[in-house]
Amino acid sequence: MRSGRREVDSYHVYEIFESSEPGDAFVHVGDIEAPDPEAALFFAKEQFLRREPASGLWVVDRRDIHAAEWPFEVLNSGSLKRYRRTPGRSGRASPSASPASDRDERDDADEESE
């Protein structure tokens, strides 16, 4: 006779992301092992939100994360294209750079090429 418990075949690693305030970006805070996403959410809440409140919580099965395996040169190919930089992306644009200063530099470059 089987009990009311379900059998757990295996545990998976889930990456945990949380957002501190409504509208804030989600930040990776760690990982846990769980049998399914629902249990992962419960475990993540117990582990990561016990002392610090958050406005949002995501769990992502590590098997669903696909990483680029391209060489550095390919991943860094946009570094010379300043006009493609997106202000506000954490760690991507320099803090002193502003869209206006990028426009001025493009205008200067255009004048020099004429």
Image (tube, rainbow, N blue to C red):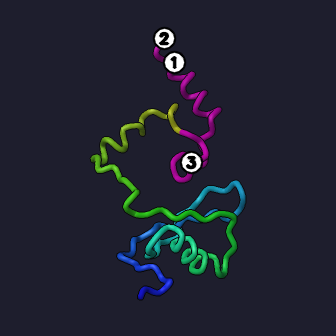
Out of 49 and 78, give the one closest to the viewer: 49
Dot 2: element: loop
Which dot, 3 or 2, sits closer to the camera? 3
Residue 25 lies within the magenta run: no
Question: Label 3 to label 2, Cα distance in Å?
Answer: 33 Å
Labels 1 and 3 touching (C-beta < 8 A): no
- Residue 114 is labelled as 2
Q: Residue furthest top?
A: 114
Disc 2 from disc 1: Cα separation: 6 Å
Q: Residue at x 35, y 76 (%)?
A: 9
Residue at the farthest right position? 22
Secondary structure type for disc 3: loop
Amino acid type, residue under disc 2 in the picture: Glu
Q: Which tag, 3 or 2, sits closer to the chain's start?
A: 3
Residue plotted at (52% across, 38% down): 85
Q: Are marks 2 and 1 in contact (CB under 8 Å)?
A: yes
Q: Which residue is mark 1?
A: 110
Q: Count the numbered circles shown.
A: 3
- Measure how far apart labels 1 and 3 are at the Cα level: 26 Å
- Residue designated by label 3: 89
* Residue 89 inside the magenta-drawn segment: yes
**Nearer-the-camera pick, 89 or 61:** 61
Quadrant assignment, res 26: bottom right
Q: How dense is the environment of label 1, judged by Cα within 10 Å: few (below 14), some, or many (20 and up)? A: few
For badge 3, the amino acid type reads: Arg
Q: Secondary structure at mark 1?
A: helix
Highlighted magenta segment, given as a residue range: 86-114
Tell me: residue 17, above or below residue 104. below
Label 3 environment density (alpha carbons within 10 Å; few <14, some 14–19, many ≥20): few
Instruction: Tell me residue 33's x, y (percent).
Output: 43, 76
The percent position of residue 65, horizontal first and vertical second, equals 40, 56
